Image (cartoon, helix red, strand yellow):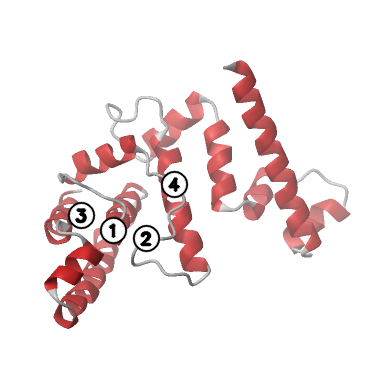
């Protein structure tokens, strides 16, 4: 176990160095300022250089106290996040969507997903939102995750409702243009009840 964790930390160190070198080669002023002045790079400047995936690796290497403190800060239910790892699972789940959006890739069928969504995260979302059968092969599940995370981070109910209503409006337009069986393949058969429960969650959170 010790060797595995040590290897993970060494991998993280390599990723951080590569990220700093990447930004230095691209003449990014934040990094170059500290390199050229022969000064240590502060943690905030390192975070400026990390991708979301690299930040996920960083968080995964944090000790239990940091993870639990983050969980408490986000008001995640302690009975479902006893080890504080849910934040890590959220970061990795959002990372693929973020990368797809940033590179203008197709997102509606979640082909951007590079790995399985952690089952504990799925169970937490189902419990907190009050739904069953959450399936991340449908984009609506990412909407559920994003809005849940936004509320936990303190985003306003109004903003979250606007986001959700805009998404519902778009999918309603899709339903008017395509046969119901095709929409079910794209959106999933439980999209509407899931989003109704998500609306309730926003109102009650």
Which residue matches tag 2? 110
Point 37% across, 49% down: residue: 153
Question: Tags 1 and 2 in contact by the CB under 8 Å rule?
Answer: yes
Point 12% across, 58% down: residue: 196
Task: Give x and y (percent) for residue 158.
Answer: 24, 64
Q: CA distance from mark 1 to mark 2?
A: 6 Å
Front-most of residues 42 and 49: 49
Label 3 sits on a secondary structure element that is helix
Label 1 sits on a secondary structure element that is loop
Nearer to us of marks 4 and 3 is 4
Which residue matches tag 3? 202
Point 19% across, 71% down: residue: 182
Q: Residue furthest bottom?
A: 177
Q: Earlier in the sequence, mark 1 or mark 4?
A: 4
Q: CA distance from mark 3 to mark 2?
A: 24 Å
Which residue matches tag 1? 138
Point 32% across, 35% down: residue: 120
Which residue matches tag 4? 115
């Amino acid at each position: 176990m010790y060797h595995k964790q040590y290897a993970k930390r060494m991998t993280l160190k390599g990723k951080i160095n590569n990220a700093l070198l990447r930004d230095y080669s691209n003449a990014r002023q934040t990094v170059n300022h500290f390199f050229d002045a022969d000064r240590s790079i502060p943690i905030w400047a390192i975070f400026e250089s990390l991708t979301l995936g690299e930040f996920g690796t960083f968080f995964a290497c944090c000790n239990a106290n940091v993870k639990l403190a983050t969980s408490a800060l986000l008001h995640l239910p302690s009975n479902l996040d006893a080890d504080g790892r849910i934040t890590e699972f959220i970061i990795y789940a959002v990372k693929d969507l973020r990368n797809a959006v940033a590179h203008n890739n197709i997102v509606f069928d979640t082909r951007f997903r590079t790995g399985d969504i952690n089952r504990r995260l799925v169970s937490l979302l189902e419990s907190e939102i009050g739904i069953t059968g959450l399936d991340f092969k449908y984009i609506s599940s990412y909407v559920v995750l994003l809005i849940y995370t936004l509320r936990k981070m303190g985003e306003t109910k109004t903003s979250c409702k606007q986001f959700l209503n805009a998404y519902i409006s778009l999918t309603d337009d899709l339903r008017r243009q395509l046969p119901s069986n095709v929409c079910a393949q794209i959106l999933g058969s439980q999209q509407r009840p899931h989003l109704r429960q998500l609306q309730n969650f926003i109102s009650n959170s």
